[in-house]
Amino acid sequence: MLVSVALVATALVAVGLALVGRSTETLPVADGAGPAPAPSAGGTPERQTLRDLMPPGVRIGTAADGRGLSLDPAYRALLGTEFNAMTAENAMKWRSLEPLPGVHAWAGADQLVEFAQQHGQAVYGHTLVWHSDVPKWVSPDWPAERVRAVLQEHVTTVVSRYRGRVWAWDVVNEVLDEDGRLRDTIWLRKLGPGYVADAFRWAHAADPAARLFINDYGVEGRTRKADALLRLVRDLRRAGVPVDGVGFQSHLRWDQSPRDLVGNLRRFAQLGVSVAITELDVRVALPASPQKLEQQAVLYRRVLRACLAVPACVSFTVWGFTDARSWIPGYHRGYGAACLFDSGLAPKPAHNALMDELRRQASRGGVVPGPD
Ligand code: 9MR
């Protein structure tokens, strides 16, 4: 019975999306995964999951953590059933992949890619060029040519290794500072602003089929930084640089909603790129209370609605799904409880809100009108 409900809901979503004009591109999963499981395959007979209800053409992803995957069967089970996409939270960062020059440590990233293959999940690669997590052996004292050579080698090696198994890459991450200027990094200092375009060209050469994203935070609403990102993407596209998409990280606070999420996503889409919610979490000031978790749920729902309202939005990814393994308490003192599941892996109001939103949209045959 529940299976047929899920199938009907899925069909209704398909109709709804046809009405709003979303392209229903086939979702490639990691190579070798075989056909993606049937819509209800992720859920137990008793419980539908996000993955069961997500409309075709939009992936539901999460950042994944290698430790959780190796050590915690309950974590593995939820990861495999709730999501049809995953991003390596840390395992594909340069410092993780190449601890010594030319010496690669692929095991952590490979483990995630294999898990994704086994569970019909697409892999979102994160991240090739970033100012953080650069291996210590890369020296700012090197001449520019040497810096350029190791960066190109890194991008080419990593993208080539996962060619056909990673559907999209964050090629450059957080290249803008808070004022919207190119961030002062080793890459900008040594290579000049052209490093951004070069990184996309190197990645494209290594895997012409991968979707190539620029990813940043603080750009979800109409901010000055978002204006600057829009100009940067427009200029790159005009110059023929293979930028396919823009990632909106969306590390939000429970009491602050970005301004005009839908309008902001739309203006990027008008440049001809895909857009994606890439790292959503909504932290609350501790201690959490039922009221704060309800407000948090409103924000999760609002971001999902914004993505579903914009046909160019191809994925909706949360930055970890359980409070037990979130980065927030370690980085934002006094905050936590940012995820869809609590530390005992029980669904929180935010998870219920996403499920409810997906069901409502399916039953109404498309995007529900109203404020974002
Ligand atoms: O969640 C990640 C945390 O475990 C790492 O210690 C940290 C540094 O590598 O990166 C965190 O993830 C970041 C992501 O890679 C880029 N956008 C911001 C994320 C949160 O800081």
Image (cartoon, rainbow, N blue to C red):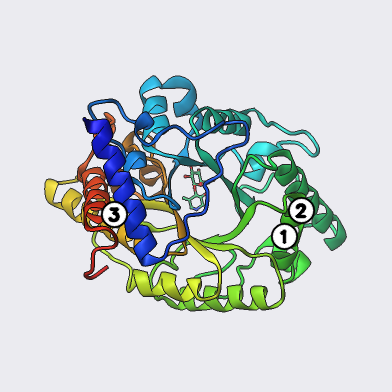
Q: Residues within 10 Å of mark 3 (few under 14, many from 20)?
A: many
Mark-to-mark CA distance, 1 and 2: 8 Å
Going from N to C along the chain, the mark reached first, 1 or 3, is 1
Q: Position of residue 89 (x, y in %)?
A: 51, 42
Going from N to C along the chain, the mark reached first, 3 or 2, is 2
**Contact, mark 1 vs mark 2 (Cβ under 8 Å):** yes
Q: Nearer the viewer, residue 66 or 122?
A: 122
Circle number at residue 39 = none
- The amino acid at mark 2 is Leu
Q: Position of residue 31 (x, y in %)?
A: 62, 36
Secondary element under disc 1, as helix, strand or loop, is helix
Which residue does the numbered mark 1 point to in the structure image?
199
From the viewer's perspective, tell me whether residue 224 is left or right of residue 153. left
Q: Quadrant of the C terminus?
A: bottom left
Q: Residues within 10 Å of mark 1 (few under 14, many from 20)?
A: many
Mark 1 or 2, which is nearer the eye?
1
- Can residue 183 be seen here? The reply is yes
- The amino acid at mark 3 is Tyr
Which residue does the numbered mark 2 point to in the structure image?
151
Q: Position of residue 4 (x, y in %)?
A: 26, 35
Mark 3 or 2, which is nearer the eye?
3
Q: Residue at x 49, y 71 (%)?
A: 269
Secondary element under disc 3, as helix, strand or loop, is helix
- Can residue 277 be seen here? The reply is no
Mark-to-mark CA distance, 1 and 3: 32 Å
Circle number at residue 300 = 3
- The amino acid at mark 1 is Ala
